[in-house]
Image: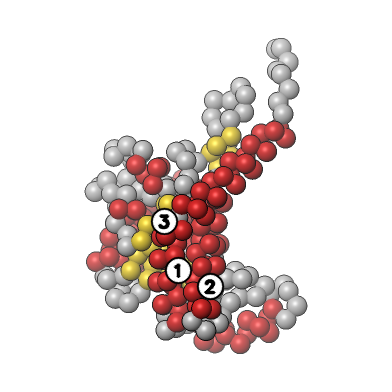
Amino acid sequence: MPEADAIDADALCADYFAATQALMRRVLEEERGPLDQAASKLADQIAVDRLVHIYGPGGHSNLASQEVFFRAGGLMHISAILDEGTLLSNGALRSMAIERTPGYGKVVITNQRLGEGDLLILVNAYGINAALIDAALEARRRGVFLIGISSFQHAANTSPNHPARHPTKQNLHEIVDIAIDCKVPIGDAIVRVPGMGENIAAVSTFANAFTLNCLVIRTVARLAERGIEPPVWRSGNAPGGDEANARFIEHFQGRVKAL
């Protein structure tokens, strides 16, 4: 078997870095309007001591809800819906099957008892799966204000007959109150290695995490402009972290289900 040509892995990593950076810059520059609108809604909730719920139904989208929940520098009012059904820890193929199951997302929202006056952030880079769409439709029926984070391009270019789709064929960004485009390209993986048929190195986790943290930053800025200092988690591994967090634990324990 002839020896293959040397592949410059450093250059491929640099390409990945550049593409990821460019994607996040697009979010920063192109999504300023919806991010500001969403931040104002979050600030309104927190100003009156209401929770901000977040749900990332589907595989790695669950990481988005964990990114801003119980996180150093994160808002204590954020309540993550960490439903066991689509967590990869319970089996990757099982997770994919459940996220494609019509009706499942409705059960999750019903179980959370969300309703009028609540706010829910739904995060899923592809923006199409059945559990996601059912969660959005049920939340809307209950009067919940919805913010969606997903890739408009990915949703628009996914076949209406794709097996992951909800029976209604709807896209998340079409049915939420505020839609934020995380810019994930079709297929998610973006690096092409010579001699390989499939791209590698996905970007959706970076895109979702960056978008969410920009939303948190803007929310805190809006609150600070109102003279409100919201409670923020400090790392328990940092000096004084446990003591700083302990001042607020009693206030949120029992209200935030996953705490």
Residue under numbered circle 1: 39
Q: Is residue 164 left or right of residue 257?
A: left
Residue sitting at x 72%, y 72% = 237
Query: Among all residues in the image, which is located at the extreme right?
Result: 239
Q: Quadrant of the N terminus?
A: top right
Using residue 12 as the reference point, say whether residue 23 is left or right of it: left
Dot placed on the residue nearer the N-terminal end, 3 or 2? 3
Residue 57 visible from this viewpoint: no
Q: Residue at x 58, y 77 (%)?
A: 232
* Place of residue 173 in the rendered image (x, y in percent of width and height, measured from the top left): 34, 53
Relative to 194, say whether 19 is above or below. Answer: below
Discs 2, 1 touching: Cβ within 8 Å: yes
Determine which quarter of the picture holds residue 157: top left
Question: In the drawing, what numbered circle is on residue 162?
Answer: none
Write down the residue under mark 2: 221
| Colour mode of the rendering | secondary structure
Disc 3 to disc 2, how far (Cα)? 19 Å
Identified at 71% across, 18% down, the residue is 5
What label does residue 180 carry, if any? 3
**Label 3, label 1: how far apart the Cα atoms are:** 11 Å
Crowd band around label 3 with a 10 angstrom C-alpha radius: few (<14), some (14–19), many (20+): many
Of mark 3 and mark 1, the one earlier in the sequence is 1
Dividing the picture into quarters, in which one does residue 137 lie?
Answer: bottom left
Residue 60 spot, x, y in % from top left = 51, 51
